[in-house]
Image (cartoon, grey):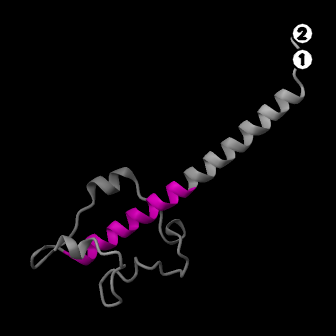
Amino acid sequence: MLRRLFRSRPPTATSRLTRIWPPATGIHHAAAARPPLTVGQIRGHQFSTARRGLDPNEVRGFLYQVADEVADLRAELIRTRTENNRIKKALRDWQSRYKNRGVWL
């Protein structure tokens, strides 16, 4: 059963989660399709039960939603680190260009 839950494919078109994956807007960006998950939503999410326990399609859909948000956060982190490096380099360049040669006023 776990193997079915962690397949690399999104839920099938016949599953109950077609409105979650892919987003109904046609945009492949999780934030554009639904509001971001909160920590409380992730920790407290309840899955409905099926004949043999949890509904695999619902669990898989939720995992894809969490994965989309993690991917968005990682992309934002990369953009932030890139911007920080650019600012640090600009500051170092400015400091080396306008150093006061040891004379402080």
* 99 left or right, relative to 27: right
Q: Position of residue 92 (x, y in %)?
A: 77, 32
Observer-nearest of 83 and 46: 83
What residue is pinned by disc 1?
100
Kindly identify which residue carries mark 2. Answer: 103
Amino acid type shown at disc 2: Val
Element on which disc 2 rests: loop
Task: Inspect this view and state whether residue 59 appears.
Answer: yes
Q: Amino acid at mark 1?
A: Asn
Horizontally, residue 21 falls left or right of residue 46, namely right
Disc 2 packing (10 Å; few <14; some 14–19; many ≥20): few
Give the image quarter of residue 52.
bottom left
**Residue 101 pos. (x, y %):** 89, 15
Q: Is residue 99 left or right of residue 24?
A: right
Tag 1–tag 2 contact (CB < 8 Å): yes
Q: Compared to 22, does 99 lie above or below?
A: above
Kindly identify the residue that appears in the image at 47 percent across and 68 percent down. 34
* Quarter placement of the N terminus: bottom left
